[in-house]
Image (tube, grey):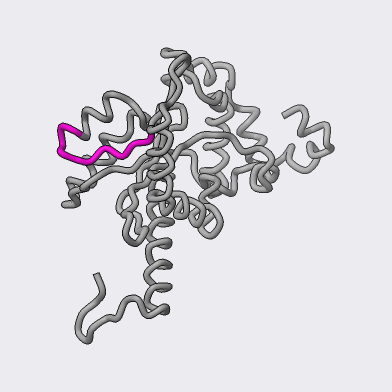
Amino acid sequence: MDSFFLMGAKPLVQNSPTMKLHELLDWEEIAHKLKGLYKREATHGGGPEPYAALAMFKLMLLGQWHGLSDTQQEPAGSRRGTDAFFGYRSYSAVDTEDGYIEHVEVHPANQAEVNKLPGLVDALIEQGIQPEGVLADKGYASAANRAYLQSKGIGDLIQFKGSRGQPVHRLQTQMNRAIATLRYKVEQGFGTLKRRFHMSRARYFEVAKTQAQMAWAALGLNLLKAMRKLQGGRLQPCAGSSPS
């Protein structure tokens, strides 16, 4: 607040309801009550340092006070891309035939992606989609994931990853290249999500809201792909029915 006043803003806000509220509240006591809200405080986990709990409380209070969305509360610099931080990681399951996104998930960025594969596959199966095989990059390479796919009768096309003192075998390197040529549609889809649907940055501060943002973007991408295929003559809808 002091740095804000140093900019000469105090005369403009000192009589505002917001400043009166600021002067009435015991912020030290509130900060004390906010301790322990972040799981990271107990687990000392890795990942990006979260916002200070008191700062987030003030931010949310201002948002409610002035009817601001999460995006409207971002600093101007963060909307120009200078203050972004790695807060969420998005996952998608894409069919290899047409590149349609069949399932999306969003999780905090400090959670290891290697543990997310079973959940993604289970979600597809619950939707009635039975994968014949799973193509995935090295980030999903683990004995547990390979055993999981085997238990489900699903083909294991996860790229191989070497370790210290045990580099990837020449045949495994060739396999990695072959897998990369098949899973390019996944990377292509993420590129479109970032360029056209602004998924380089989460608009919200909550996983559920960011999940919704990702789902809407995936829907937009699927519609875009369908439109292009219709315009290209690859899909010919029949009278009285819709293409599936």
Which quadrant of the figure has residue 36? top left
The quadrant of the picture occupied by the C terminus is bottom left
Q: Is residue 156 left or right of residue 179?
A: left
Q: Residue at x 59, y 49 (%)?
A: 72
Taking depth in this image into account, of 86 and 146 the one nearest to the observer is 146
Q: Is residue 148 left or right of residue 222?
A: left
Residue 73 x %, y %: 59, 44
Q: Residue at x 33, y 26 (%)?
A: 142
Kindly give the residue lying farthest to the front in the view shown. Answer: 170
**Number of labelled discs?**
0
Residue 123 x %, y %: 23, 43
The quadrant of the picture occupied by the N terminus is top right
Which quadrant of the figure has residue 15? top right
Q: Is residue 56 left or right of residue 170?
A: right
Taking depth in this image into account, of 48 and 100 the one nearest to the observer is 100
Q: Is residue 163 magenta?
A: no
**In the picture shown, does residue 121 fall above or below 235?**
above
Q: Residue at x 57, y 40 (%)?
A: 62
Residue 6 x %, y %: 83, 31
Q: Which residue range is magenta in the image?
A: 150-159
**In the picture shown, does residue 122 fall above or below 3?**
below
